[in-house]
Image (tube, grey):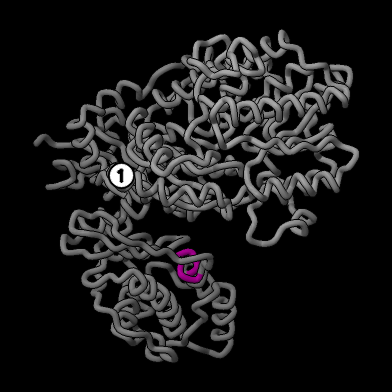
Amino acid sequence: MREHLTLGIDVGSAAVKAAVVRSRAGDDATVLGTSIQRIRRRELREVIEAAIAEATGGRIANEDFDYVATTGEADAVEFRTGHFYTITAHARGALHFDREAAGALDVGSLHARAIRLDPRGKVTGQRMTSQCASGSGQFLENIARYLGVPIEDVGELSRSARTPEMVSGICAVLAETDVINMVSRGISTADILKGIHLSIAGRLVQLVRAIGIEGRVVVTGGLATDTGLLTALQECAEGGGARKRPGKAVNVQFVTHPDGVLAGALGAALLGAYRHRQLEESGRLAMLMGGAEVGG
Amino acid sequence: MSAPTDPCAPLLARAEALLEDLSLHGVAAWKAAHGGAPAIGIMPVFAPRPLFEAIGVLPVNIYGGGDRVDVIKGDAYYQSYICHIPRSTIEMGLGGQLDALDGMVFPSTCDVIRNLSGMWRMLFPQKYSAYLDLPQTFEAPLGGLFYRHELSRIAAELVARGARPLDADRLREAIIVENRRRALLADLASLRAREPWRLKASEAYLLTRAGAVLPCAEHIELLEAFLAAAPERPVRAYDNVRVIVLGAFCEQPPIGLIRTLERSGCDLVDDDFQLGLCAIDGAIPLDEDVGDQSPLDTHDPLDALVLSYTLRGQATATRYIADGVKGEALVNRVRTLGAEGVILAAPSFCDPALLDQPMIEQALNDAGIPFTSFKYAENSAQFQTIREQAGAFSDSVKLWGAA
C-alpha cells in the first residue's frame, strides 16, 4: 500500500492545531510536524496559515497533500478536502496515542466530550457537557488568571494540595463566586485549584459513566496535559474526589499523551489518509479532485 | 489577489430577501402595480397555482413565521402539543403582517390546518377564507370530479370577489407557464444532485422558496438567470456524504438548520422541504395522452390540472396510500441519486410526517440504507445538538458505511 501525506487542521475556539502525517491509510503513521497557535485576537485565517506554515516547516504546499482534513469550526479552511466531526477526529487521535483505548475524553476550551470507540476508532457513543461552562478549559484558565497562576503551573500546584475546597460543579458563575470567597477566607491556591479540578473531573467522570466506557480513556484536547486534572479524574473514577459527595467508582484508567492537545488534528490527518484510500478504491477520488476547483 | 466573485450572489440575495419579507411588501407592490388585483394566501401543502394565476390572482404560499416571529397571541389558540406553523400564522395575521392578502386558502393538510381555517373565518370575517378539500381517492370519476368541483368552486368564489372569470385559454396559458417553471425546478434539482457543491441545498431552498411569493413568470426569470450563471460560479467540491433529507411536511426548517446540516459534512442532494413543490411529479399533462380518464380529458385545461394531482401525485406524507409505497419510493430515490444516507427531519408534533416515519424507517432498514432522525420547529434557534448528530452521522457513513 502506498504512503499518504495528509494534513489535519483542528480549529478550536481558543487555538488552531495542525499536524502533518505520513501514513499508510492511517496506519504506520509518522508525525512530520505539528503546530499549536493560540487565536487570541488574531484573524482566524491568519492563525490557520501560521499553524500550517509551522507544521509544514514551509516545505510542503497545500496541493502536495493527498488529503487536507479539518475538524472543529473549519469553514475558513476553504482548500480542505473533507471535514470530520470533532468526536470522530478525537476518537481516531486517541487510538493513535493508545491502541488499547476504549474511549476518549476531549476537554476543550468551551466543551468537554466523552467518546466511546470500538477497536477501529469508530465512535459508538458520546456525551457532551451541556450549557454550563464550568466543565471547560476556558473556566479553568479564567480562574488561573484570577489567582495569578500561570496556566502551565496549575497542574502541579493542584497536585500539591492537602485539603481541597470544593466549588460548585453546576455553574461557572457560582464557582467563580466560590473562589472569591475562598480567597477571602485564606484558602491556599493549591487547595482552590484542586477543588476546581475535582469539580470538573466529577462532571467529566459522569459523562464517561453515562456512556458506559470501561478500560483506558485517553484525555485529549486543551487540558490533556493538565496533570492536576488527570489526577483528579482518576481519583473521581475510583470513587473518591468530591469530598462531600463521593461518586460511584468506574472501571476506567485515564491516560494522556504529551501531544494530547493535538488529538483532533492528528486524528483528522489519519482519517484523511484512510478516507483517501477509500476514495481511490471506489473510483470517486478522480471525481472529487476533478471538481475541486472549477468555474470562476 | 481578490477572491473571484459569484455571479449568482445577487440572485441568491434577492431570494433571501423574499424569504425574509414576512410582511409581504413585495405582494403589496405587485397588487399596486396590477390595479389592486387580489392576492390569496395558500397554506401548505398543496393548491394548484395556475388556477389562481389564470383568474388574475397572485397565489402566495404561506409557510408561517419561521424563526423571526415572536409568537405571543398565536399560542393562545393552540394547545402545547400542536406544531408551530399555525401559531405563527395566527400571530402574523393578528399582527397585520398578512394584510396584503385578500384571503386565504387552507388545503386539507391535517386537522390542525382545518382548525386554522375555521379560526381564520372567525378572526377575519371580512377576508376570503376557503377550505380546499383535496381528494384521497384518485380515480377520475370519483376523486377527479370531486377535485374539479372544488377548484371550480374556489375560482367562482374568487371571481365573485373581483377576480377575472375563469377562462379556458387563460388557464391553458397559465399551465404552460407553470410547466415551464416546473421544468426549470427539475433542472435545478438535477444540477444540485449532480454537483451539490455548485448548488447547495440552502441555495436551492431559497431559489425555490422565492416562487412562494413571485408570479410564475418572475420566478421563471429568477431560475433561468441562476441556471445560466451557475456554470461560472467559483466553487469547490468537498469530500461530503450524499444525503437525502425527508419529512418536512408543511412547517419549514429555519434556513440556519439547512446550513447547519451542510456544515456537518453532508451534501443534501434532495429534500422535501416545500412538499407542495414535489406533490406532483413532472408536468401538468395538458393535451398529453394519459389513457382513458373519462369523464376527464387533458385537452380541457381544468381537467389537466385535476389529472396532474390524481395521476401524478408523488408518494409523500400528504397521501393516504398503501403501506410500503412511500418507503419504496424513497429507496428508489436514494438509489437513483446515489445517496449514501437519509436524514429524517420532521417538525415536532407533525402527525402526518411522524406517522409515516416508522414505515419509512422499516423500508430503509430493509434496504440497508443508513439513516438518522431528529425533530425541529420552525423557530428553532439552537442547532448545536443537530450539528452533533448530523456530523456524527455523516462521519459514520463516510468512514464506516453505516450509521
Write down the quadrant of residue B241 in the picture. top left
> Where does label 1 land, which residue?
B397
Write down the quadrant of residue B251 in the picture. top right
Residue farthest to the right, as pictured: B126
Label 1 amino acid? Answer: Val
- Identity of the residue drawn at 18% across and 45% down: A26
The image shows residue A178, relative to residue A23, as above or below, that is below
- Identity of the residue drawn at 43% across and 16% down: A295
Tell which of A110 and B143 is nearer to you. Answer: B143
Residue B105, position as x, y percentages in the image: 74, 35
| Pointer 1 local density, CA inside 10 Å: few below 14, some 14–19, many at least 20 | many
Tell which of A280 and A257 is nearer to you. Answer: A280
Residue B119, position as x, y percentages in the image: 79, 49
The image shows residue A240, relative to residue A57, as above or below, that is below
- Provide the residue span drawn in magenta: A134-139
The image shows residue B389, relative to residue B305, as above or below, that is below
Residue farthest to the left, as pictured: A1
Write down the quadrant of residue B147 in the picture. top right
Specify whether B290 is left or right of B36.
left
Residue A59, position as x, y percentages in the image: 25, 33
Is residue B203 at all visible to an observer of this figure?
no
- Identity of the residue drawn at 64% across and 15% down: B175
| SS class, disc 1 | helix
- Identity of the residue drawn at 42% across and 75% down: A203
Main SS of the magenta segment? helix
Is residue B349 at all visible to an observer of this figure?
yes
Tell which of A145 and B118 is nearer to you. Answer: B118
Residue B359, position as x, y percentages in the image: 41, 48
Specify whether B225 is left or right of B72.
left
B164 magenta-colored: no
| Mark 1 chain | B
